[in-house]
Amino acid sequence: MNMMQHLQVPNRDVEYVFSILKKNNLLAEGKLIYPSIDRKFRLIPLSENIPNIPKELSKYEVIYAKYKVDNRIDTNWLTHLSLLINIDDFEKFQQLWPSSHEFVGDMMIIKLDKTILQFSSQIAKAKLMAHQNLRLILSDQGVMGELRIRELMPIAVRHKNTIITENIPNELCNTKVTVKESGLEIICDPKKAYFSTKLQTERQETLSFAKELRDMLGRKINVCDPFCGVGPAISSLLNQQDLVNNLLSSDLNPEAVQLLFENLTKWDKKPYPSEAVDVEWVYPNRLVGTGDVVKLVTNTEYLGRWDMILINLPHRTLELLPLIIPLLDTSSASLIRGRIVVEEKDIDTTNKIIQEILPKCIHNKPKPKLTIKRDYSSKLRLCSFEAWLE
Ligand SMILES: C[S@@+](CC[C@H](N)C(=O)[O-])C[C@H]1O[C@@H](n2cnc3c(N)ncnc32)[C@H](O)[C@@H]1O
């Protein structure tokens, strides 16, 4: 009959009762807390065969009632949220509660629909309650400007076992964290420089392409990453012995370069400057620093020497592609790995444009073609491509 024991609790006591039941492992798993018909109570599903209701809860009635199965993702945080806000609002905005999030170190980044901004504090509090190891919740207002930095607003922080959602002190909002990816540590600060954990698969693909190119050339490769951010794409390349010979890693954003240097100090196992410097040979095989790619390509010393170029500035790829071609070492096979944002209807035309811009492709490799990686907006798609060049 789909019935089970529920504790019938007046709305105002729900949060308190829930925490006691949770502490004593008395909550039924995968079942929903829901309002009574008169909406004066919440019915909290109890685990089967409970020995005894804790004394402090004995004043509440245990009733048999239909149980409701909880099919939602990440139910734990929604349960907390349902206890922090009015049940009518909870149900009204059911479809809008954020269903995805990004973990960056001990921070969580979430995107909130405008309609539910009024519940930011409660959402963030519920997230912190559900994920005990999290420290900071940031609301993501999108990637901005030339440097592609995310506009992030702290909406809750955990400090000494309390959750603060109002007037959060600045000193508790540190966003510089270390992220683990494929066993490697990447230092990043999403408030100061672009970084996305979602590109992990992309980076693994880049690694396998780099190995393929190395095997094709029969030697270590020279890698150029002129939009490197904090350097995540090269972390796993540098971790491979016998893969990278010379490296150019640069970015327009000096804050990104400062973090890049911290990362390189670890990945390359040798010291890099503690502050960002303009692009220079910091070591005989390391050309690194702050630089605009447009200026970089005017230095003839840097041209014609790279086997693999990464171009990750998806809104400007078509514009910048012709500019970076002279960086390629054309004496042997080379590879350009890029990302681009285009409308789905324009993919075929863009493929043709890319093929026209680029030099001749290696005959036994497919011509560069965009692969859709994910939706960027309702019309735009984020795509990637590889061009194997003669
Ligand atoms: C989408 S982010 C990619 C960063 C990095 N490759 C990653 O995967 O995390 C693009 C980067 O290009 C940098 N950038 C923007 N315009 C540039 C320019 N003209 N020259 C060099 N870097 C630029 C931005 O600062 C940003 O870090």
Image (cartoon, rainbow, N blue to C red):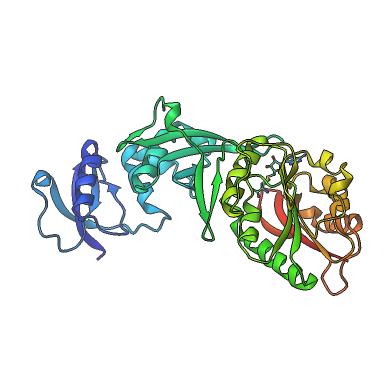
> Quadrant where the N terminus lies?
bottom left
Q: Position of residue 320 (x, y in %)?
A: 83, 46
Residue drawn 11% across and 60% down?
Answer: 51
The answer to whether residue 65 of the structure is visible from this angle is yes
155 with respect to 372 (left or right): left
Residue drawn 75% across and 41% down?
Answer: 279
Q: Of residues 220 and 186, which is closer to you in this image?
A: 220
Q: Of residues 243 and 357, which is closer to you in this image?
A: 243
Residue drawn 88% across and 57% down?
Answer: 358
Q: Quadrant of residue 390?
A: bottom right
Residue 19, placed above or below residue 221:
above
Q: Quadrant of ligand 1?
A: top right
Q: Position of residue 171 (x, y in %)?
A: 44, 29
Q: Residue furthest top?
A: 167
The answer to whether residue 369 of the structure is visible from this angle is no
- Count the labels in the image: 0
Q: Position of residue 105 (x, y in %)?
A: 47, 47
Residue drawn 14% across and 60% down?
Answer: 50
